[in-house]
């Protein structure tokens, strides 16, 4: 069933206008009598039927509601070193599908891409839209937060996760020694194309982070978060 997010808790009826209306009527070509799922972005799904379509609106009747069961039991935040080009878009899309709750573009010493505040804000709007579309496609119960760009120092100082993990090509502990099925929150640090320098590694470690490895192969910056998140989801029982 098609899924659509709204930013409020509905009553018995829902009226879709603007982009949401265009998405289901113009893009998906849905018709009166079709069913779709509407999610309030707080973990509740509403099964709805389209009962009226106007020139610029669609009216839905809520037939039932139920708790969304697709959200993982472990909340994962990704502090991603800002990569070049469109790589961050791919990271956001794939990590949203896999269950990340928050993705934070993080500036490090070796970041080649350094957008100014105006450009970063514009890109963040694009990133949030990608997260929304990926959340709808994958049946998520929430839309992951795409945070504003921060420095690594800001990221470390704001990180309050239960488990903090730095993935570093210099080696580290196996991930399975750091994550257990009961783990409730994890933050992971992924470097940009050039990785982290030694001072940054020390900064992250001093915050309580453990250094972990994803194997003997060196992964690209857009591959590492997907591999790490997949492994965490598996170790916490969220890929079963």
Image (cartoon, rainbow, N blue to C red):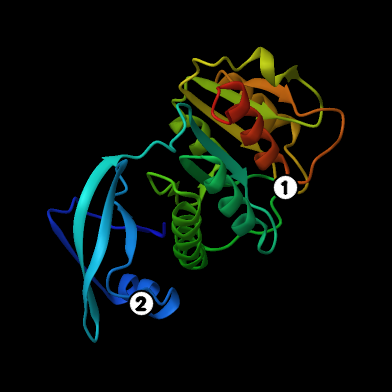
* Picture layout, residue 103 above or below residue 84: above
Q: Residue 168, image x and y in percent? A: 75, 30
* Picture layout, residue 35 above or below residue 32: above
Please tell me the numbered disc located at residue 145: none
Q: Residue 70, image x and y in percent? A: 44, 38
Q: Residues within 10 Å of mark 2 (few under 14, many from 20)?
A: some
Going 28% across and 57% down the picture, which residue do you hit? 6
* Picture layout, residue 170 above or below residue 177: below
Going 41% across and 77% down the picture, which residue do you hit? 29
* Front residue (pair 48, 123): 48
Report helix, strand or loop for mark 1: loop
* Front residue (pair 81, 16): 16
* Picture layout, residue 41 above or below residue 77: below
- Mark 2 vs mark 1, foreground winner is 2
Q: Residue 45, image x and y in percent? A: 30, 46
Q: Earlier in the sequence, mark 2 or mark 1?
A: 2
Q: Residue furthest bottom?
A: 55
Q: Are marks 2 and 1 in contact (CB under 8 Å)?
A: no
Q: Residue furthest front?
A: 33
Q: Quadrant of the C terminus?
A: top right
Please give left or right for residue 153 compared with residue 101 in the image. Answer: right
Q: Residue furthest right?
A: 216
Q: How far apart in space, not on screen, are marks 2 and 1 (Cα)?
A: 45 Å
Residue on which disc 1 sits: 110
Going 49% across and 38% down the picture, which residue do you hit? 154
Please tell me the numbered disc located at residue 25: 2
Please give left or right for residue 14 compared with residue 66 in the image. Answer: left
Q: Residue 182, image x and y in percent? A: 49, 15
């Amino acid at each position: 069933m098609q899924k659509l997010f709204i930013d409020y808790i509905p009553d018995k009826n829902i009226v879709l206008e603007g982009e949401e209306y265009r998405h289901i009527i113009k893009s998906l070509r849905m018709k009166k009598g079709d069913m779709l799922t509407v999610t309030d972005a707080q973990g509740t799904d509403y099964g709805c039927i389209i009962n009226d379509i106007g020139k610029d609106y669609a009216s839905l009747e809520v037939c039932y509601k139920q708790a969304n069961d697709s959200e993982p039991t472990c909340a994962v935040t990704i502090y991603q070193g800002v990569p070049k080009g469109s790589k961050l878009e791919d990271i956001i899309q794939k990590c949203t599908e896999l269950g990340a709750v928050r993705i934070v573009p993080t500036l490090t010493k070796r970041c080649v891409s350094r957008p100014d505040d105006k450009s970063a804000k514009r890109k963040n709007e694009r990133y949030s839209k990608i997260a929304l579309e990926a959340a709808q496609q994958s049946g998520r119960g929430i839309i992951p937060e795409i945070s504003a760009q921060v420095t690594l120092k800001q990221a470390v100082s704001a990180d309050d996760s239960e488990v903090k993990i730095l993935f570093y090509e210099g080696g580290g502990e196996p991930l399975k020694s750091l994550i257990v099925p009961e783990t409730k929150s994890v933050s992971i640090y992924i470097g940009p194309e050039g990785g982290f320098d030694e001072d940054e590694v020390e900064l992250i470690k001093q915050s309580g982070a453990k250094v972990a490895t994803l194997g003997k192969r060196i992964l690209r910056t857009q591959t590492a978060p997907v591999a790490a998140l997949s492994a965490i989801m598996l170790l916490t029982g969220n890929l079963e």
